[in-house]
Amino acid sequence: MDLDRLTLLTLGAALLCGVLAVAGVRTYAAGRARRQELIDRLAGGHGSRPATRRRFPNLDRRLRATRFGRRLELRLAATGLSLTPAEFLVAMLTAVVGLWLVAQATLAAFFGPIAAVVAVWAAFAFLNWQRQKRIEKFINQLPELSRILANATQAGLALRTALAMAAEELEAPAGEELAKVSDKLAVGHSIDDALGELADRLPSRELVVLVTTLVLANRAGGTVVGSLRNLTKTLEERKETRREVRTQLSQVVVTAYVVPFLGIGTLLLMDRIAPGAIDRMTSGFLGQAAVVAAFVLYAVGFFLIRRFSKIDV
């Protein structure tokens, strides 16, 4: 009799442990799913696009804990790209390995490391280009933004409400950036801090003027309609001036990119005419030094042309 009771007690305890284990696993899985959903929703932006499951979550978590990862995350946020630091790093390393192997197989073994360095530079240059393109697009939207804020404040709306309204009416990137500002204001950040972070993400003279106007008007408590009206007209004129300058300098910008490709094309043509010539040329120290000096001169020429063609309006 005692043995039967002990058996039933053991079976009951085992059944209870099994039920608790299943409930614990389900609770843990549901918690992880909610956590991942929250991360994806925050990474997906202000409802502008559906959340996507991120790749390399463990690497991304470790990378964000480093100073390099945090800086890379800020640069990616300024570009508007839907990439995490880990995804960008893995893509860059894949491109580095691929270009290394292609250059080594196509030209010579000496060009593998050079191609890898060029790949790393090209990856970060792409981020800068994407960020600058986003800034230019945002600058083009500033006259419309200023007009919306002026109309909203003239109608008696508060500046916080006017910014939220502009975030809903404007397209990306202005809509996305103002949505971030509106979210920060909703959780207790001041207008000065929220607009200051916006100016840091997308630095430009036009945005600094607009932010300064809004901040001063908010501190002084006066009307901002007249200032925004005048600012809208000024931004429209600067927009046209920037467009004319960019059109005038388009040929110079193309030249900056054509010059380095001429050097690479010359190497490929040389190897095509005399197979193995590049391999023989880079087999000695003098040939390697000449190739490195040539690439350095091409890089210097590229940066000088880009510097001379950069005119701040």
Image (cartoon, helix red, strand yellow):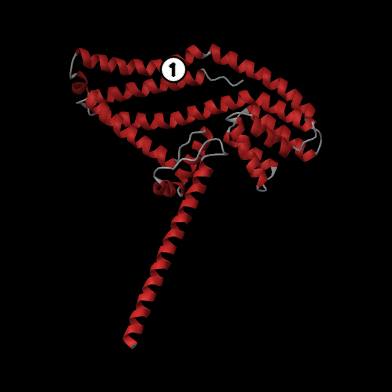
Taking the spot 67% from the left edge, 28% from the top edge, the residue there is 145
- Specify few, some or many for label 1: CA neighbours under 10 Å numbering under 14, 14-19, or 20 or more: many
> Image height check: is 258 above or below 8?
above
- For the N terminus, give its image quadrant: bottom left
Q: Residue furthest right?
A: 222
Q: Position of residue 238 (x, y in %)?
A: 65, 19
Taking the spot 24% from the left edge, 28% from the top edge, the residue there is 104
- For the C terminus, give its image quadrant: top right
Give the side of residue 299 with respect to residue 188, left or right.
Answer: left
**Residue at the spot of label 1:** 256
Q: Position of residue 158 (x, y in %)?
A: 76, 38
Give the side of residue 279 with respect to residue 145, left or right.
Answer: left
Q: Position of residue 80 (x, y in %)?
A: 52, 33
Taking the spot 58% from the left edge, 14% from the top edge, the residue there is 245
> Image height check: is 139 above or below 253?
below
Nearest the viewer among 284 and 181 is 181
Taking the spot 46% from the left edge, 60% from the top edge, the residue there is 27
Residue 193 in view in this figure? yes
State the image quarter where residue 166 is shown. top right
Give the side of residue 156 with respect to residue 207, left or right.
Answer: right
Residue 107 in view in this figure? no
Label 1, secondary structure: give it. helix
> Image height check: is 304 above or below 2?
above
Nearest the viewer among 303 and 186 is 186
Give the side of residue 228 with respect to residue 40, left or right.
Answer: right
State the image quarter where residue 294 is shown. top left
Looking at the rendered structure, the kind of residue marked 1 is Ala
Q: Position of residue 167 (x, y in %)?
A: 64, 34
Nearest the viewer among 225 and 306 is 225
State the image quarter where residue 199 is shown. top right
